Image (cartoon, rainbow, N blue to C red):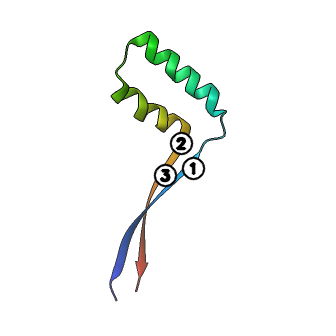
Amino acid sequence: MVPRAGVSVDICPRDMPITLVGTAGGALALWASAPAAIVVPVALLIVLDVRVRRWRRRT
């Protein structure tokens, strides 16, 4: 028997009002003159709860 490794990625929305977070992120981006390539991934990480789990299973 060899243990098998795996990875699971769980993505779920946080318990914040999404419109409030989106408005705040957009206002910050306008104020800081940040490019959209940086603002969009950061805003998604704020709005979404991303968890990466490693696990091992015996076969």
Against 52, is 57 above or below?
below
Q: Residue at image x 55%, y 37%?
A: 47
Of residue 58 and residue 27, the one placed in the foreground of this image is: 27
State yes or no: discs 3 and 1 in contact (Cβ < 8 Å): no
Q: How many other residues sit within 10 Å of disc 1, few (<14), some (14-19) or many (≥20)?
A: few
Q: CA distance from mark 3 to mark 1?
A: 9 Å
Q: Residue at image x 32%, y 84%?
A: 2
Numbered marks: total:
3
Element type where label 2 sits in the image: strand
Element type where label 3 sits in the image: strand
Task: Judge depth for marks 3 and 1 and give the one in front.
Answer: 1
Q: Determine which residue is flagged by label 1.
A: 12
| Residue at the limit of the structure toward the bottom, as seen here | 1
Residue 51 numbered tag: 3
Q: Residue at image x 40%, y 86%?
A: 59
Q: Earlier in the sequence, mark 2 or mark 1?
A: 1
Amino acid type, label 2: Leu
Q: Quadrant of residue 56?
A: bottom left
Q: CA distance from mark 2 to mark 1?
A: 6 Å
Residue 48 numbered tag: 2
